[in-house]
Amino acid sequence: MPATESAAEPPAPPAPGAEILTRERASAFAKLALKGAKREFPNKPGHVLLDDKDAKTPKALHPAFYGCYDWHSAVHGHWMLVKVLRAHPDLPEAKEIRAVLAGHLTAANIKVEVEYFNRPEAKSFERPYGWTWLLKLAEELHTWDDPDAKTWSANLKPLAELIANRYVEFFPKQTYPIRAGVHSNTAFGLAFAHDYARTTGNKKLQELIERRAKDYYAKDADAPARWEPDGADFLSPSLCEADLMRRVLRPAEFATWFHEYLPGAAKGEPKNLFEPATVTDRTDPQLVHLDGLNLSRAWCLRGVLAALPKGDPARAALGASAAKHAEAGLKHIASGDYAGEHWLASFAVWMLSLPAPE
């Protein structure tokens, strides 16, 4: 992965209690996303070629989501641009953000994306990681009372509906969950899709996700979190599962389930789950995943904290760990290398959009 100059200085580590999406952070993150959104190469397509006619450029295959190295990173980069602009409409980058969104999220471009997904060879394309980020983008646009956003939301709707239907078609057939710490993780794939379903009133999708989440995870206990992390994780299998279950269980049920699932949480155990991961080379596209792991652990911990009662004995350890992971991750969003810069800001923005530990 070639090194490039950083588009912005990395945001300063947050002071205690200041882990929020400030205007300064939003601007720095927007610069990184804008840089990637229009950058077609290098690119890692997940494309199946049947003959020489299928050998096309990323932009020809995916006119809406061709930048940021791969399709899913392009999708969550667009989500991030929407999110930061909603949070801070007066960003210096606001005009450029709107121009990129308007240029990419056209009805014609989304039609090509839909046609790609309808290829028989694309049945499993971006399942479920890219799927769930696309639905997060659709949810963000759906809830934004802005004239441009209403147009982009309408344009995106055919692709969002196609992917929502893919969930309903596929997950009854997936007998066992995938517990990896990377793109294939089932729990993360269901979490954002559940948010989308609730927000848009897609009862069929919501009910399917809640049923499958309970089928997959309701009986889990004493999670082997001491084995985490793997060397290229950007998701925590154990914490992603908890972050999903806090969505689908009632609060009292979730608290009971959580303490059976991570029985050492009140003591901050296992230690390697509660301490940030170490990254040794941010130019390596796999090793830099661990910066993303620190950010995604932080957002999972924030989500779990929000779901537990105020007097829960695990709150102190979870809150301290969430703050440590957030600080560790936020230090390295803009490392100077495209390996991490094309995607880490999206993880930071989602983490910062959730309530910080009290």
Image (cartoon, helix red, strand yellow):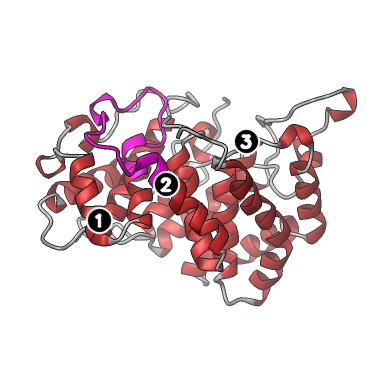
Q: Which residue is mark 3?
A: 69
What range is drawn magenta here? Answer: 214-241
Q: Is residue 225 magenta?
A: yes
Q: Is residue 233 magenta?
A: yes
Q: Is residue 86 above or below residue 47?
A: below
Cα distance between the residues tagged 3 and 1: 41 Å
Side of 194 where 275 appears, left or right:
left
Examine the image and state in which quarter residue 225 appears: top left
Check residue 253 in the rendering and tell me which mark sits there, or answer none. 1
Mark in the foreground, 3 or 1: 1
Cα distance between the residues tagged 1 and 2: 14 Å
Q: Identify residue type, mark 2.
A: Ala
Look at the numbered disc 1 and give the secondary structure of its residue: helix
Q: Which residue is mark 2?
A: 213
Q: Is residue 52 above or below residue 304?
A: above
Task: Compare residues 16 and 45 and report the one nearer the observer.
Answer: 45
Look at the numbered disc 3 and give the secondary structure of its residue: loop
Side of 133 where 39 appears, left or right:
right
